[in-house]
Every structure is written in structure tokens, then in C-alpha cells.
Amino acid sequence: MADAESAQKRTTGSGPTRKRTHAGADTDTGEHAGFRFFSGDRVLWIIVAVLAVISVLVVYSSTAKMALDAHTARTTSHFLRQQLMILFASVVIMVAVQKINSRIYHLFARPVYVISVLLTVAVYFMGVTTNSAARWIPLGPFQFQPSEALKVATVMFLACQLAARQSKIDKIRIIPSLKFWTWRRSREQRRIWREGTWPILMPVVVSCAVIFPAHTSSAVLVFMASWVMMLIGRVRFGELMKLIGLACVGIVLIMTLNLGRSETAEGRVSTWIHLWTQSQTEKPIEQLTDTERSMIAIHNGGIFGEGAGQSAMRVEMIHPESDYAYAFFVEEYGILLAVALLMLYLWIFFRAIEIFRRCGTAFPGLLVLGLALLITCQALLHIMVTVNLIPETGQTLPLISRGGSSTLFTTIALGMILSVSRQNDEQSHDTPRSESIYEK
């Protein structure tokens, strides 16, 4: 009888038990799991802690130039305290977010998306403009960048839309006919708009359109992450290839009409091409671009680096604490540790894949992969700029570069990933209406 009662408890989950995850670590399930302060994927928590420590080191040393600026009248300690406050607040929010059930994210995805779009549009009328781009809304002593919120909100909303259509997603078309005059008369075209274009494609188009005028590379980042989410969500591959073609045509049209920051983007592309095609050996240092200075910093760093606080290029680069944080890190800590840092960002994505595989339903799985794509792709874009593989983008290094909005919403995204991981560990997912991502 005792054996029978014990077996019944294991099958019904009436008492706390332990199970072994795919990562090979024992995790709590049942009642005691909810009381763990740092629940979810342990590897992700370790990665966040390591990146936070690196952020403190980078910001403290790289802001020496800002401290020497006579207009700021602030010391490096001021910027260090500021970054520590941002990291502390962000981690507290991340802990709170990872305790929220993913059904709540599903419930609030639409209103959060709409509010984020409206705030991003509002920036162009009431925001603070820097370098000819309006990106921030002033909130007392702080500045809020709504486009960072919109990136996360777009992934949430798109995950909702894809998850709700998994039973028929392989039959849905998302690209209507280019003969727009047939949209009203044709029943087939109205069906495409109703089932695919409006619910799946338009949220991505709207997000990219409102982000593009102020931050072109962020719009590209949202498009890339959304495209991969649609691919994983089993949208027809032919439709996705059409979408890439239309995106390329749209970029050419925007550049031709000189819309948004086309002139800035064109100048950056021209500079990038010039660096690859023309000799730069005779150029004086005051004429070097930030990308060239970042490559000098990487060269100076070598294998083992110059040592903490020993960077020579930090006073030459315009934004060593944000746009070129990776190059600064290489100069002080060397290529070996820089490669390890790159692996941490790739590891975030691999952990997300593992969490995705354990999700029984479509929404949490797509949410996890979409958010991980945003973080990893942003890091890769930042790193590729520093070594001149792509033109300058202005993308910061997630969780490391100095900045409030980017750090805040990166930790919120990680909190959502950890929330899904926690629910996987606790086996607390209810079966929603949306079907599994694996169903055909």
C-alpha cells in the first residue's frame, strides 16, 4: 500500500519531486519550486551575472573620456554608480518578470504592442533628438527609448499570432497580389488579407516602419528576428522569400526617395566601402573613423590585452562605452576573453533552443526563440561593426554597453525566457487553444 501511495503521488504531482532536465541538472517541481528566487535555466542566470560584471568593468574604464570632458564635470565613479543602479534595477525587474506565467504575456501581447507603437510614434513629436534622430522621451532625469520596448512587444505579438494559426499555417498566404486594384473585388485576395497579411505580416511592417526613421538598424533587426520566427512558425517558405524580395525593393525605394535617415545610411555604407577599397596607411589619426579606431584598439589588445584601465583608444573613440564597447573590451582584455564573450551571446541562443524544444505549445516556444534572436543578433551586429564586416549601425552590446533602455528591455526579454524555462521545469503549462509547433 505504501508503494502504491508513493507511486500515486509521483504521477499526480501531489508532493514536491525532483526531475532531471535536458541540461543534466536537477530542478525542483511541485510546491517548493515556486519559492526559488532565481528559478528557470541556471546557465542563463550565470551568463547574465557574467555579462553584468563585464558591463561594470567596461563602463568604469571607458567613461574616462566623459569624465575628462569639461562640460560634464563628472567623475568615472559617477558613471559607475549610474550603471550599477541601472543593472540592479534591471535585474530586480528580470526576477519579477520570470515569475510571471507565460499566459499573462499571451493575454497582454496586443495592448503592449499597441502602446509601444504609439510611444515610438510619439517620439517624433515630443522626443529628444540626438545626431539628427529622435529616439528618446525625457522622463525627468532619465530618457526612455520606446523602440527598445517595441522590439520586445513585436516578438510577443507575432508569437501570439503565429501560435493561434498553427493548425492551418502551412495553407495561409501572407503576401497579397501586387495588383492592389484587385484586393477589393477578389474574394481570394480578401481572404489573404484577413488570414495572413493583416494578423501576421502587418505587425512586423508597422514596427519596422515606425522604428526605421530614427534607427534603421533596429528596424532591420526586428525584420530579421520576425522572419526567422515566421520560418520556425511554419509560414510557407515561398511567402517568406517573396517577403525578402519586397523588403529589398522597399529599401531601394527608400534610398532613392531619401526617406528617413537614408542620407546617414548611405554615408556609412560609402565609408565602409572606402575602408575596404582604399589604403588608409597615410591618414592622420584625427581623420580616422570610429570603426578604424576600433580596429586599432583590437590590434593593440592582441591575445591577452593591455590590462584593465590601460586602453589608449578610449580617448580617441567617440562612444567607447556604447557603440564600440566590444573593441574597447578587446583592447583591455585581449582576443581570448573577447572570443569567450562572443560565445556567451551564442550560448544564450543555444539555451533558448533547448528551452524551445521542451515547450509543449507554440506560443512560449516562439516567444523564447524570438527574444533570444533579438539579443544574439544585436550582439553580432555590434561585433561585426567593430571589425568592419558591416557598416556602422549604432547597435549597443546587450547588457554591457552603457545605457538604460537597452539594458532594461534586454533583461525583460531574458526574464520572459527564464519564465518559460521555469514553467517547463515545473510542468505548469496549461494546454491553450494554440496547437503545438511540431504538429503538421
Image: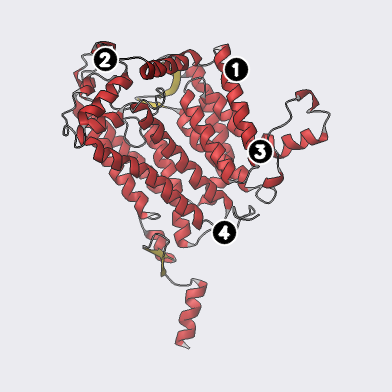
Residue 422 in the image: x percent, y percent? 44, 56
Name the residue located 24 percent from the left edge and 21 percent from the top edge. 66
Q: Secondary structure at mark 2?
A: loop
Q: Secondary structure at mark 1?
A: helix
Work out whether residue 213 or residue 246 is closer to the camera in this orientation and state it: 246
According to the picture, the residue beneath numbered tag 1 turns out to be 253
According to the picture, the residue beneath numbered tag 2 turns out to be 281
Q: Would residue 40 appear left or right of 400 to someone viewing this image? A: right
Outermost residue toward the bottom? 1
Q: Secondary structure at mark 3?
A: helix
Q: CA distance from mark 2 to mark 1?
A: 36 Å
Q: Is residue 433 visible?
A: yes
Q: If you read the primary sequence from the N terminus, does the residue marked by circle 3 or circle 1 appear first?
A: 3
Q: Amino acid at mark 3?
A: Gly
Residue 353 in the image: x percent, y percent? 47, 50
Q: If you read the primary sequence from the N terminus, does the residue marked by circle 4 or circle 1 appear first?
A: 1
Name the residue located 62 percent from the left edge and 36 percent from the top edge. 240
Q: Would residue 96 appear left or right of 200 to someone viewing this image? A: left
Q: Amino acid at mark 2?
A: Thr
Q: Amino acid at mark 4?
A: Asp
Callout 1 crowding tier (Cα within 10 Å): few <14, some 14–19, many ≥20 = few
Name the residue located 31 percent from the left edge and 38 percent from the top edge. 87
According to the picture, the residue beneath numbered tag 3 turns out to be 238
Q: If you read the primary sequence from the N terminus, does the residue marked by circle 3 or circle 4 appear first?
A: 3
Q: Quadrant of residue 315?
A: top left
Q: Secondary structure at mark 4?
A: loop
Q: Is 400 placed above or below 268 here? A: below
Q: CA distance from mark 3 to mark 4?
A: 33 Å
**Residue 132, numbered circle:** none
Q: If you read the primary sequence from the N terminus, does the residue marked by circle 2 or circle 4 appear first?
A: 2
Q: If you read the primary sequence from the N terminus, does the residue marked by circle 2 or circle 1 appear first?
A: 1
